[in-house]
Amino acid sequence: MNALQKNILNTLSLYIHKLRRPFGLYLILEFFLRIVLTWVSRESIDSASISKGLVNLIKIFSIGFTYDVAVGLFIMLPAVLYATVSPVPGRMGKAFNYSILGIFIFAMVFKFAAEILFWDEFQSRFNFIAVDYLVYTHEVSNNIRESYDMVTIFGGLFLATGIIFLTLWRYLKLTPTPVPSLKNRLSFMGIYLVMLFGIYEGISDRFTNVLSDQISRDLSFNGTYGFAKAFFENSLDYKRFYLTSKDVGEHKLEQPIKISKIGPEHHYNVILVLMESMSAEFMHRYGNTQNLTPHLDTLANESLVFEKLYATGTRTVRGIEATVLSIPP
């Protein structure tokens, strides 16, 4: 083996050693996340037959793995930069490495849990709704604290982080030798940046178009990529998340009922009650037994109630403007 080949192998050895744990962890968590989301959505996935369902699952996980690898390489960029400038850190550098790895593990575990909750709410991977939530951090954080036991959730996240970190602990002290020269490390860094640019230009959500239904396309998607894409494009697919006149026929929605005049005309007072984060599940009328809304239940029992309505937006403010001004979101 000549000197050039040794330099190449030493350089690859350094970066593989630095990246294999966080990169492998990221891919494993994304794989298990996709399994969880696929399982909870199994009744909605296009699987008219066993063979078709199996082919669909292979497509979901194959396309998903492609997205995961591409996004993972971008996530690893800070680690590549750090390995380039500090290939063999001292004692303080090692402590810094352990701290960053712990933070990275917690971030990945947190994202894992957040995507499951987001999917349960919207049947979608991260999109502009998730970005929108960051804009209204105060309102959303209060809503989350009221809706979930955050002490238990964060306790579980820290526990999972600790278990994963301790599992990787015995591999943290291995250091490849010899260390490649700065020239070789910078050359690798340049190649890595060129590769990321190629991925940036080539990656697209069009890869999911080979899947026949929307749930399958979302399962094959990557939440981190979806979040970044929504953040920079500042948009949400209107036709997917909002009903249009075309949806009336496709989803067999009931057409508006024509009401003819019966008896004398009465001019009633109409009161609109608008509430933040209110759900039908809190009302006794729809099965709740905690008596949370006694006055609202009384009004519902004595009034004309419309039960087949559809949300006009992804946030309360969208519903308010549509109700008050009679306009779409």
Image (spheres, rainbow, N blue to C red):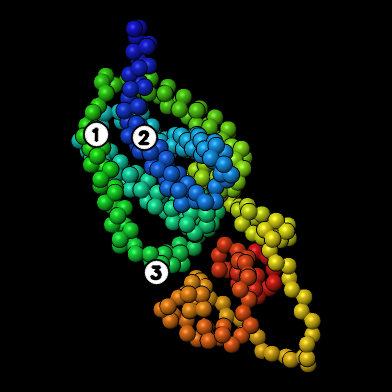
If the image is split into quadrants, where does the C terminus sit?
Answer: bottom right
Q: Determine the image quadrant of residue 203.
A: top right
- Identify the residue position indicated by label 3 in the image: 146
* Residue closest to the eye, 128 or 220: 220
Whichever of labels 1 and 2 marks the residue nearer the N terminus, that label is 2
The answer to whether any part of residue 43 appears in the image is yes
Do the CB atoms of the residues marked 3 and 2 lie less than 8 Å apart? no
Separation of marks 1 and 2 at Cα, in angstroms: 14 Å
- Identify the residue position indicated by label 1 in the image: 172
**195 horizontally vs 112: left or right:** right
Badge 2 element: helix
Badge 3 element: helix
Task: Please state which amino acid type lies under the numbered disc 2.
Answer: Gly
* Above/below status of 87 relative to 295: above
Do the CB atoms of the residues marked 1 and 2 lie less than 8 Å apart? no
Residue at image location 26% in from the left, 19% down from the top:
178
- Identify the residue position indicated by label 2 in the image: 24
If the image is split into quadrants, where does the N terminus sit?
Answer: top left
Whichever of labels 3 and 1 marks the residue nearer the N terminus, that label is 3
Residue at image location 55% in from the left, 68% down from the top:
316
Separation of marks 3 and 2 at Cα, in angstroms: 35 Å
Task: Please state which amino acid type lies under the numbered disc 3.
Answer: Glu
Q: Position of residue 275 (x, y in %)?
A: 53, 76
Whichever of labels 3 and 2 marks the residue nearer the N terminus, that label is 2
Badge 1 element: loop
Separation of marks 3 and 1 at Cα, in angstroms: 40 Å
* Residue closest to the eye, 305 or 272: 305
Q: Position of residue 188 (x, y in %)?
A: 42, 23
